[in-house]
């Protein structure tokens, strides 16, 4: 049987996994599966602001460089994640009480430095992450509160200047269905495009609960694609209440297939990234109490039914 990346390569799309630095450095089984099955990687944490610049002015590139170098030597593309977000900010930035003018300069410097460092080596950047509330209003953040929604266009322009070849994305969760949140993002995307802002794609995180792939997902992705934007599933996982039964693992396989088909069945779907590869290192149990088993490989690196579902969806 061919691999996930074999199927994806044949279709000219990306199949990605979020990668954690710890296992990348220390677990042979992790890199074996990663390099055999995936043609794209995303840093699970290593490119977030708190990881890159824990103290003002002193950058920590170690883990991010390691991932980009790993990808280069294994013929994988890299999705950059993420530049403008309310979370995982270093405390000097979160608690700094900066003025709007200062924040603007800080953000511009961060984007130029980070995107510039990896120029030509990152095919897509999640420039803006999780900017919306569920009701479609803009989420409060250090950026939104002081700079307003204009910070989104600024960030996209700065990123485009730093790497004109990278596809620039707005990324969010609970926007897979046609709902108030995806409506608000759709309106913003149209507005940015009309203003000539370099926005190239929308990332649908796709952190699903078992059985919860929305019925309106494909039509919703298509309306973004119809704007001329790329669409991608950027953080796919499907969590199950623990312990997972055989029937639940079978349902999860169906869900993986449906979710990937919902993207790949739409023009301009660039690919699907899972938020990890193995249940051993998934963020799910630590974040959603009582849930787990969300990824295509089990804790012993055995392929689950979800692997087959994902494979059949590619
Ligand atoms: C998560 C990581 O998986 C965790 O290791 C970390 O502790 C918190 O962040 N949406 C995103 C990702 O855009 O960056 C988040 O990643 C998961 C939700």
Image: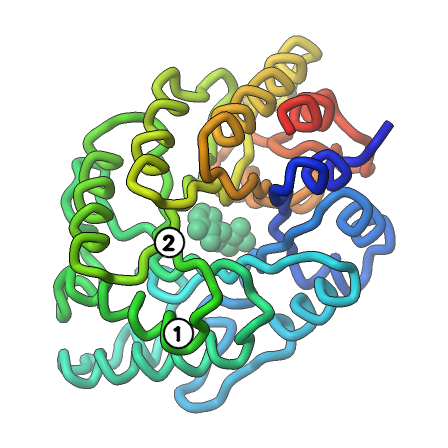
Residue under label 1, please give it: 90
Of residues 61 and 226, the one nearer the viewer is 226
Q: Which residue is mark 2?
A: 200
Q: Residue at x 35, y 23 (%)?
A: 219
Q: Quadrant of residue 90?
A: bottom left
The mark total stands at 2
* Location of residue 59 in the rendering, given as x and y in whole percent from the top left corner: 51, 85
Q: Tell me: 99 left or right of 279.
A: left
Is the N terminus in the top left, top right, bottom left or bottom right quadrant? top right
| Drawn side of residue 77 relative to residue 208, left or right | right
Q: Is residue 185 left or right of residue 83?
A: left
Q: Residues within 10 Å of mark 1 (few under 14, many from 20)?
A: some
- When the figure is inspected, residue 79 is found, relative to residue 303, above or below; the finding is below
Q: Residue furthest bottom?
A: 57
- Helix, strand or loop at label 2? It is loop
Give x and y (percent) for residue 58. Answer: 48, 89
Mark 1 or mark 2, earlier in chain:
1
Is residue 124 positioned above or below 302 on the image? below
């Amino acid at each position: 049987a061919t691999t996930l990346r074999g199927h994806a390569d044949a279709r000219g799309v990306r199949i990605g996994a979020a990668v954690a630095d710890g296992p990348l450095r220390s677990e042979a089984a992790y890199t074996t599966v990663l390099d055999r099955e995936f043609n794209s990687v995303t840093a699970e944490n290593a490119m977030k602001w708190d990881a890159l610049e824990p103290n003002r002015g002193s950058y920590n590139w170690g883990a991010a460089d390691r991932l980009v170098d790993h990808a280069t030597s294994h013929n994988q593309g890299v999705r950059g994640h993420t530049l403008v977000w309310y979370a995982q900010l270093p405390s000097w930035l979160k608690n700094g009480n900066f003025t709007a003018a200062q924040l603007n300069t800080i953000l511009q410097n961060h984007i130029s430095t980070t995107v510039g460092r990896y120029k030509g080596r990152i095919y897509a950047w999640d420039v803006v992450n999780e900017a919306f509330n569920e009701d479609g209003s803009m989420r409060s953040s250090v950026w939104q509160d002081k700079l307003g929604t204009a910070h989104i266009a600024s960030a996209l322009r700065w990123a485009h200047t730093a790497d004109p070849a990278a596809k620039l994305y707005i990324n969010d969760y609970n926007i897979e269905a046609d709902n108030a949140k995806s409506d608000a993002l759709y309106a913003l995307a149209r507005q940015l495009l009309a203003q000539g802002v370099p926005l190239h794609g929308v990332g649908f995180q796709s952190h699903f609960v078992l059985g919860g792939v929305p019925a309106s997902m494909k039509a919703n992705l298509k309306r973004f694609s119809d704007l001329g934007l790329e669409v991608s599933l950027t953080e796919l996982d499907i969590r199950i209440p623990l312990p997972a039964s055989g029937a639940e693992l079978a349902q999860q396989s169906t869900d993986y297939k449906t979710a990937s088909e919902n993207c790949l069945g739409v023009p301009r779907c660039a690919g699907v990234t899972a938020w990890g590869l193995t249940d051993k290192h998934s963020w799910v149990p630590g974040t959603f109490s009582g849930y787990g088993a969300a990824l295509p490989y089990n804790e012993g690196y055995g392929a689950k039914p979800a692997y087959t579902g994902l494979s059949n969806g590619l």
